[in-house]
Image (cartoon, helix red, strand yellow):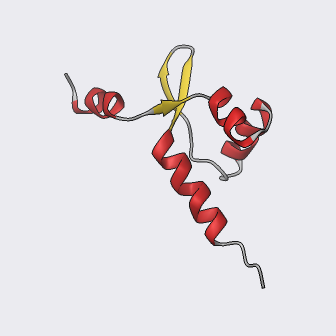
Amino acid sequence: MSENNQLKRSKNWISDRTIAQRFEISRSTVWAWARNGKLPAPVKLGENVTRWDEEEVDRLIDESLRSISYD
């Protein structure tokens, strides 16, 4: 098995639908956020399978929340 395939198997992959449910947004908003950098770029795992690395999504959202100033 190639190193790339092992990497893909060791991650927890989530769909646009899962992200939309988590943040109570539409699936089209998930894709818009990915296009403008609010979410990491998705990974194409198959012909009709595109997913996000859950850890990367969580990290990027955490960083975004820390950057908000409440002064």
- Residue at 65% across, 36% down: 19
User: Which residue is at the front of the view, 43 or 16?
Assistant: 16
Q: Residue 67, image x and y in percent?
A: 65, 72
Left or right for 36, reference 15: right
User: Which residue is at the front of the view, 66 or 28?
Assistant: 66
- Residue at 71% across, 72% down: 68
Q: Residue 37, image x and y in percent?
A: 65, 52
Left or right for 11, reference 51: left
Left or right for 13, reference 70: left
In the displayed orientation, state which residue is furthest to the bottom.
71
In the displayed orientation, state which residue is furthest to the left.
1
Q: Residue 47, image x and y in percent?
A: 52, 14
Looking at the image, is 20 positioned above or below residue 58? above
- Residue at 67% across, 53% down: 38
Q: How many marks?
A: 0
- Residue at 54% across, 50% down: 58
In the displayed orientation, state which residue is furthest to the top.
47
The N terminus sits in image quarter? top left
Left or right for 13, reference 28: left
Report which quarter residue 70 is drawn in: bottom right
Report which quarter residue 62 is drawn in: bottom right
The C terminus sits in image quarter? bottom right
Report which quarter residue 8 is drawn in: top left
